[in-house]
Image: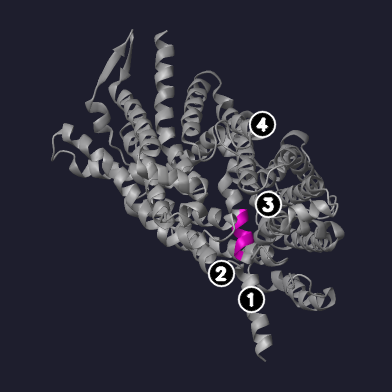
Amino acid sequence: MTSIAAPPKRLLLYALPIVILLLVLPFVVEPYQTVLLSYGLIFAIAALGFNLLLGYTGLLSFGHSAYFGMGAYGVAFIVKYLKITSMEVFLLGGILASTLVAALFGFLCVRYTRIFFGILTLALSQVLWSLAFKFFWITGGTDGLRVPTPSLLGGQVTIALGKAQDKMDFLAHRYYYYVLVIFCVCVAVMWVIVHSPFGKALQAIRDNETRAEFIGVQVWHYRYVAFLVSGAYTGLAGALWVPLNGLTTPDILVWTFSGKIVFFTVLGGFQTFFGPIIGAVVFNYLETYAVGHTVYWQLVLGVVLVVLVLALPAGIVGTANRLFLKVRRAT
Amino acid sequence: MDVLIIHFLNALLYASVLFLIAGGLSLIYGVMRIVNLAHGNIYAVGAYTTAWAVGRMLGSAPAITLYALLPVGAVAAAALGAVLEPTLLRPLYKRAEEYQLLITFGLLLILEDLLRLIWGPYPLSASSLYEALGSLSIGESIYPTYNLAVIVVGGIAAAALWGFVYKTKFGVILRATSQNMRMASALGVNVNRVYVQAFTLGCFMAGLGGAIIVPQQGAVLGMGVDALVLAFVVVVIGGLGSLEGALLGALMVGVVREFGIAFFPEIELAVLYLMASIVLLIRPAGLLGRA
């Protein structure tokens, strides 16, 4: 894994222009583009959490829609039952709800690996989906639950009352920066996690479970904590997503949404740290573009996925890294 | 009492179709160790092809001969399988199984839209076959004869498959490959050919499931994804890779679904998934699976 062990100093040098670009973006492009990018950044947080399991622990979950959905529905329940619209409460509630579910599901799932882990996560996530789908008096059924525009930073930043056109401005500027800051924090925290002894232990488990056990790594325990962190990240993404979308429906709990999260990660490259981030943002543009231009957008995405798996299994970032190394060796 | 019999027949109807889908899924996993996420769409291809063929021939041929068109969907699904295995799946056997899940997920997306592209967004129906058989009376209730025919076909298919796998030379080779692919290969079995045959047979069964249920239910978009999740529940309960398990799982799911819809509709789906989760927890290899 030479690609992820790059020295942080040089990495910061690369990251700085990107962060500056992201900061000035709302003043340069149309609001629609910033909102679109917000979706991409939110999905990137989910993919980052998902990749802690796939890329670093070697567990392919086909049920991460459960945690994303719990984050979103957790927020919707806060609005519905507690009548609170503070974003900070949303985030706490979303993380709490998804971590609770991850604590339960993870407890059941991490005893297994490979295909059984994948199918068990899928089956459990479908339990939540069917509950959200059928208990319409609580969850609104297929109509979903509406979530109003929240107030940020403990009510310091809000939407101007009674101005309908302010909503777009709010989402494209204030909310975008909010998402951006959380995104940067999430990336930094995840970087620390995967480079900590804990992260190294996860990678040891991924590469050789038996050996890891022999040198004293408590495999079950580490996998469980990785599962929790992964679920909390995905739940946070769900909580950030729902005010942007304005509505949460059972669609985000269906297993095909889990497939999308897997797709983000493989598109970017799950053997790299930044792969899932790039993958999520690119996928979001790809999907929006495909949906906007053809009714057969699933066909486009499916072909991309098949070609990707057959021709570029290392994903965008993995392939770019390889090319970069090749060029450097040649010169 | 009549009501109970009708519930029971409906459960058998569900179970027949589910067995055809899940049996194919399980067969493919047993031999090739691939969980085919696009399997539900293969079932949908069977349903659409039959509905299309029946729609084309309707009016120009006597109603009775239309029943001969039912296998068309199964053959189309089998042909699709025979093309897909060597082209898309074969390059992946040496890679991690994550990639196999991904490529079949990609295939799911592609097939879903190909159906829309070919047959449009509106449902197709072959209900003339359903209506032509009329209904018979059970006690004071009536029951469609076609449903009974589906149950019979499901039973015959299960018996034929059992004979095929356990009583023929091909079945021996199939089981040998499934138990130890390298050893079978060393003994002179052409593993590539067994794989394509197993995948084709699995797709044929799914296609047959689609073909026989389409006169009763019609063909709609999304039917594949719905069926896949139920087939998953079936094979998880019965045991991935086990045909007897698929039969047992299909019967259990059929009964729970039918009585669930009748008596506790709100949590009918959740109960199914919970059943699968509990079985996985107690016996990860399924009730009749070998770990």
Q: Which residues are magenta?
A: A261-267
> Of the residues under marks 3 and 2, which one precedes in the sequence?
3
Up the image or down, A28 lies above or below B253; here it is: below
Q: Amino acid at mark 3?
A: Leu
Query: Crowding near pointer 4: few (<14 within 10 Å), some, many (20+)?
Result: few
Residue A324 highlighted magenta (yes or no): no
Q: Amino acid at mark 1?
A: Ala
Q: Are marks 3 and 4 in contact (CB under 8 Å)?
A: no
Q: Amino acid at mark 4?
A: Ile
Query: Crowding near pointer 3: few (<14 within 10 Å), some, many (20+)?
Result: many
Q: On what subunit does the disc labeled 1 rest?
A: A
The label nearer to you, 4 versus 2, is 4
Q: Which residue is mark 3?
A: A59
Query: In this image, B152 relative to B182: left or right?
Result: left
Residue A320's label in the rendered image is: 1
Tag 3's secondary structure? Answer: loop
Up the image or down, B103 lies above or below B39; here it is: below
Callouts 1 and 2 on one subunit: yes
Distance from Cα at disc 3 to Cα at disc 2: 21 Å
Distance from Cα at disc 1 to Cα at disc 2: 10 Å
Q: Which residue is mark 2?
A: A312
Distance from Cα at disc 3 to Cα at disc 4: 20 Å
Residue B282's label in the rendered image is: 4
